[in-house]
């Protein structure tokens, strides 16, 4: 199994490499370790500013909630890594042309967001010389050297953005992609059934359709086992993030309009896109399943009516 999406999932420990090696194990361990360190670092930073005039306690607690959801999601997906790898293998027969190329482009977009967010935010803060933000990153300590301040601020903000929302967006993308593949395959199955006339819709054809439908149902059941809790955590984190964005606008817009707009713009765009993709892709699957049942039932009804009419005509 190749492709940037699968490789990144392996780096995060959410899937298993086709050819495990010590180098891959070290890479996965380092990434997971950095994510845990980023979470602990961010958690401590927020604890330090609780009760400070510049930081509203409600907003701080909401931030702690959604980054905690993100780290919980990481451990949930690590536990499901073998099943997710097997699911990747089972879904290969559904891949449309240029599937790998399309997913690679989306993955690159997902991972470009934290880079541009960190760069934009740190550059803006540096230009306006808002030192209280850098003191926040260093637990109240001040750094005099501007280059060090910029680089360390960028590194911390980039790491935080990888933890959330990039991590949740990555899992949401995988889930949405799998749902999309299933819905497109079922849609193709619908088109294939519609091409049949009542006469050509024989028992052999019906059994073939049922077997292919059953194969998709088994994949959907496995997806439910893997992503049911994960999708709930993602939606909870994203809804909490949306509430945090609204709280930031209410609390900070009058004091720090620039950083607030940048933060809310990047965060809300990612979270809303993630939620929309999950609900749209997952909601399309039962629609296509119902279409298959409706079309097949209509053909069978027409076949039954045609058979009765033919029998009556022959007797007459």
Image (cartoon, rainbow, N blue to C red):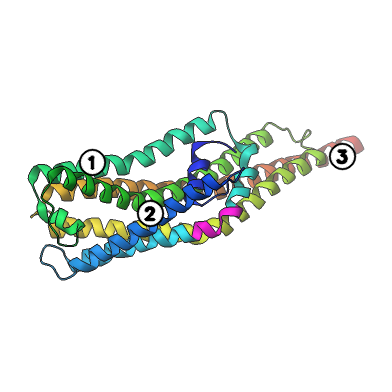
Q: Residue 6 vs residue 316: left or right?
A: left
Tell me the mark number nearer the camera, choosing from 2 and 3: 2
Residue 180 in the image: above or below residue 132: above
**Residue 279, horizontal then vertical, whole percent:** 45, 50
Residue at left 18%, top 46%? 148
**Under tag 3, what secondary structure?**
helix
User: Which sits earlier in the primary sequence, circle 1 or circle 2?
Assistant: 2
Q: Considering the image in quadrants, where does the C terminus appear?
A: top right
Tell whether position 80 is magenta.
yes
Magenta part of the chain: 76-83
Q: Residue 101 vs residue 256: left or right?
A: right
User: Which sits earlier in the primary sequence, circle 3 or circle 1?
Assistant: 1
Residue at left 21%, top 41%? 120
- Tag 1–tag 2 contact (CB < 8 Å): no
Tag 2 residue:
34
Query: What's the distance in space between the residues labelled 1 and 2, CA to CA?
Result: 20 Å
Q: Considering the image in quadrants, where does the N terminus appear?
A: top right
User: Which sits earlier in the primary sequence, circle 2 or circle 3?
Assistant: 2
**Residue 229, horizontal then vertical, whole percent:** 50, 62
Residue at left 27%, top 47%? 155
Tag 1 residue:
119
Query: What's the distance in space between the residues labelled 3 and 1, CA to CA?
Result: 77 Å
Q: Residue 108 vs residue 176: left or right?
A: left
Tag 3 residue:
311
Q: Residues within 10 Å of mark 2 (few under 14, many from 20)?
A: some
Tell whether position 135 is magenta.
no
Q: Residues within 10 Å of mark 1 (few under 14, many from 20)?
A: some
Q: Nearer the viewer, residue 84 or 311?
A: 84
How many marks the image carries: the answer is 3
**Residue 171, horizontal then vertical, whole percent:** 46, 50
Quadrant housing residue 204: top right
């Amino acid at each position: 199994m190749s492709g940037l999406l699968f490789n990144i999932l392996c780096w995060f420990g959410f899937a298993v490499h086709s050819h495990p090696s010590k180098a891959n194990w070290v890479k996965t361990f380092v990434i997971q370790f950095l994510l845990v360190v980023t979470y602990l670092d961010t958690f401590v930073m927020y604890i330090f500013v609780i009760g400070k005039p510049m930081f509203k306690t409600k907003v701080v607690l909401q931030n702690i909630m959604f980054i905690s959801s993100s780290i919980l999601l990481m451990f949930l997906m690590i536990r499901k890594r073998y099943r997710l790898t097997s699911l990747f293998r089972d879904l290969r027969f559904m891949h449309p042309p240029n599937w790998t190329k399309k997913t690679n482009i989306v993955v690159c977009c997902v991972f470009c967001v934290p880079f541009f967010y960190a760069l934009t935010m740190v550059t803006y803060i540096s230009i306006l010389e808002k030192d209280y933000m850098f003191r926040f990153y260093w637990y109240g300590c001040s750094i005099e050297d501007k280059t060090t301040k910029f680089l360390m601020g960028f590194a911390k903000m980039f790491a935080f953005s990888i933890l959330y929302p990039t991590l949740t967006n990555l899992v949401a993308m995988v889930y949405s992609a799998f749902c999309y593949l299933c819905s497109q395959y079922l849609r193709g199955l619908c088109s294939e059934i519609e091409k049949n006339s009542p006469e050509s819709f024989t028992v052999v054809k019906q059994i073939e359709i049922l077997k292919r439908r059953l194969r998709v149902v088994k994949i959907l059941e496995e997806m439910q086992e893997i992503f049911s809790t994960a999708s709930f955590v993602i939606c909870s984190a994203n809804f909490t993030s949306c509430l945090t964005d609204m709280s930031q606008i209410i609390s900070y817009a009058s004091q720090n309009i620039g950083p607030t707009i940048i933060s809310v713009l990047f965060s809300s765009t990612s979270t809303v896109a993630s939620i929309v993709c999950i609900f749209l892709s997952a909601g399309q699957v039962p629609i296509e399943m119902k279409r298959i049942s409706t079309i097949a039932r209509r053909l069978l009804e027409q076949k039954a009516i045609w058979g009765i009419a033919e029998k009556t005509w022959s007797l007459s």
